Image: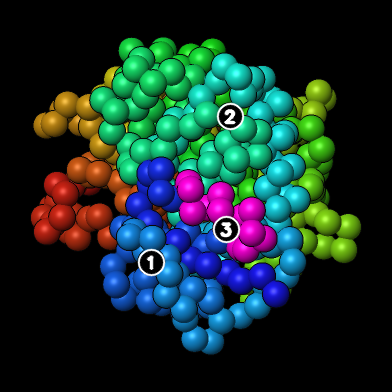
C-alpha cells in the first residue's frame, strides 16, 4: 500500500528531487509549510497522519498512527485555513497530470524553450503545481526558497526563465521592469490589480481544483462551470480532488464541486467572479461584493492596498467599511472621493460609509486577505493600537 510522506524541506532543488522520486515510486506527498512553528507543524501531522517525514537533510523518519492512502494518490495539500481548521486535499496523479497538461496547453508552453520560475510557497497548491507541471511536461524549472524581486528578475535575465506564477503583492514588488522580463505571468491568490499588462494571465481556482482552472475568465479544456440559482459557482473537471484526507468528498454525485464563490457567466461562457459568498455585504437590502468595491477604490492614487468588509449598522443592517493602506503616509484619501469612485463604478449602495487607515492588511501566505481579522486592526476610535498605525474616518 502506498504511503503518505511529509516533506519538511525548504523550496529548492532537494524538494523537487525528493518530490519526483516519491511520485515515481507511487507514494503520496504532503508538503509542510516552512513558516509554521513546531507546535503547528505537529498539529498538521496529527491532523493528516502521514507515515513518514523527510527533513532538509534528506533523512526520513517514520511516524506512528499513519492513515492509509489509495493507489494513485499523489498529493495531500493543506488548505490555507482562511475559514477554520485546514483540510487535507487529496489529489490523484491523474488529476495532477490533467492540471499540468491543461494549464500548459493554455499557456502554449514549449518544454524545449520555456522554463518556470517557482517562487511561491510549496505548501500551497499554487506553488506545488508549478513543480508538478515541470515533472509531467518535462519543462525546465528554477525553484527558489521564497520570493525576492532581485532573484526572480535574475531567474529570467540570467537563467532563461520565461514563466512565473505570482500573487498581486509579489507582482507589485517585482515592478514593471521585472514583469516585462517574462513571457507570461500567471496571477492568482486574490483579486488582481487594475490595468494589467497583456502577458499577465489571471486565474481562478483553489486547492480542491489542483490549481487554477479558469484563465482570464475562460475555463481550461475539460473544465465545466455552472452558476446555481443562488449565484454560486460550481466546477467540474478531471483535475479536481478525489476527497479530503478524512475521506469526505465535497463533490456531488455528478462530480460538481460547489466553490463557495459567487459569479456569473456571460453569453460567451466567460466567468466573472464576484467573491466569497460569506463575504457578501448586504447594506440597505443591496448586495455589495467586496472585491468589486476594492477594484474601484484601487483607482484612487492615494490607495496602495485596500480590503472591504461589512460592519453591523443600526440603519442599514450592514455598512461598507474600506480598510486602506495609503500610498503616502500621513495623506489618507478623502472618504468622499472613495465614495464617489465606488458610486460611479458600481452604484451608491457600494459606497463605503467608513474608512479605516491601516499599516498593513492581514493576509494568508498566498496573499488572500483575512477578512475576519480586519476589525482587529483597529483597537479604538482614536487610532491607538499596539499593531500597525490605524485610524477611522466616518461621514
Q: As displayed, is residue 267 above or below residue 213?
A: above
For disc 3, the marked residue is: 22
Q: Is mark 1 on a helix, strand or loop?
A: loop
* Residue located 73% across and 70% down the image: 70
Mark 1 and mark 2: span between their CA atoms? 28 Å
Residue 290 lies left or right of residue 111; in this view the side is left
Q: Residues within 10 Å of mark 2 (few under 14, many from 20)?
A: many
Q: Could you classify mark 3 by the number of other residues whose Cα lies within 10 Å: few (under 14), some (14-19), or many (20 or more)?
A: some
Q: Give the range drawn in magenta.
A: 16-28
Q: Does the magenta stretch include residue 20?
A: yes
- On residue 59, which mark appears? 1
Image mark for residue 139: 2
| Alpha carbons under labels 3 and 1: distance apart | 14 Å
Relative to 370, is 207 on the left or the right? right
Residue 332 placement (x, y as % from top left): 20, 31
Answer with mark 2 or mark 3, whichever residue precedes in sequence.
3
Amino acid at each position: 500500500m502506498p504511503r503518505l510522506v511529509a516533506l519538511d524541506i525548504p523550496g529548492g532543488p532537494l524538494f523537487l528531487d525528493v518530490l519526483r522520486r516519491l511520485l515515481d515510486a507511487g507514494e503520496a506527498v504532503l508538503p509542510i509549510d516552512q513558516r509554521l512553528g513546531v507546535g503547528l507543524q505537529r498539529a498538521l501531522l496529527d491532523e493528516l497522519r502521514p507515515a513518514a517525514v523527510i527533513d532538509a537533510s534528506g533523512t526520513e523518519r517514520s511516524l506512528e498512527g499513519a492513515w492509509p492512502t489509495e493507489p494513485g494518490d499523489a498529493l495531500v495539500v493543506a488548505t490555507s485555513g482562511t475559514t477554520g481548521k485546514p483540510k487535507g486535499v487529496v489529489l490523484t496523479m491523474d488529476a495532477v497530470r490533467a492540471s499540468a497538461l491543461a494549464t500548459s496547453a493554455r499557456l502554449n508552453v514549449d518544454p524545449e524553450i520555456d522554463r518556470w520560475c517557482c517562487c511561491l510557497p510549496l505548501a500551497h497548491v499554487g506553488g506545488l503545481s508549478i513543480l508538478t507541471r515541470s515533472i509531467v511536461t518535462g519543462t525546465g524549472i528554477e525553484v527558489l526558497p521564497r520570493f525576492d524581486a532581485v532573484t526572480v528578475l535574475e531567474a529570467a535575465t540570467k537563467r532563461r526563465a520565461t514563466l512565473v506564477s505570482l500573487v498581486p503583492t509579489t507582482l507589485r514588488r517585482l515592478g514593471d521592469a521585472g514583469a516585462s522580463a517574462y513571457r507570461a505571468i500567471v496571477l492568482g491568490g486574490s483579486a488582481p490589480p487594475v490595468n494589467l499588462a497583456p502577458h499577465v494571465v489571471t486565474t481562478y481556482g483553489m486547492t480542491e481544483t489542483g490549481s487554477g482552472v479558469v484563465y482570464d475568465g475562460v475555463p481550461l479544456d475539460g473544465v465545466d462551470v455552472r452558476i446555481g440559482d443562488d449565484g454560486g459557482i460550481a466546477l467540474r473537471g478531471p483535475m479536481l480532488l478525489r476527497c479530503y484526507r478524512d475521506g469526505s468528498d465535497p463533490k456531488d454525485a455528478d462530480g460538481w464541486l460547489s466553490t463557495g464563490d459567487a459569479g456569473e457567466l456571460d453569453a460567451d461562457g466567460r466567468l466573472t467572479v464576484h467573491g466569497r459568498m460569506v463575504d457578501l455585504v448586504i447594506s440597505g437590502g443591496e448586495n455589495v461584493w467586496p472585491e468589486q468595491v476594492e477594484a474601484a477604490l484601487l483607482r484612487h492614487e492615494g490607495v496602495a492596498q485596500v480590503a472591504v468588509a461589512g460592519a453591523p449598522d443600526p440603519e442599514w443592517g450592514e455598512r461598507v467599511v474600506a480598510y486602506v493602506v495609503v500610498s503616502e503616509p500621513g495623506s489618507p484619501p478623502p472618504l468622499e472621493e472613495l465614495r464617489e469612485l465606488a458610486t460611479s463604478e458600481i452604484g451608491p449602495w457600494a459606497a463605503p460609509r467608513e474608512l479605516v487607515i491601516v499599516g498593513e492588511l492581514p493576509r494568508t501566505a498566498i496573499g488572500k486577505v483575512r477578512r475576519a481579522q480586519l476589525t482587529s486592526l483597529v483597537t479604538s476610535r482614536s487610532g491607538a493600537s499596539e499593531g500597525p498605525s490605524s485610524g477611522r474616518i466616518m461621514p
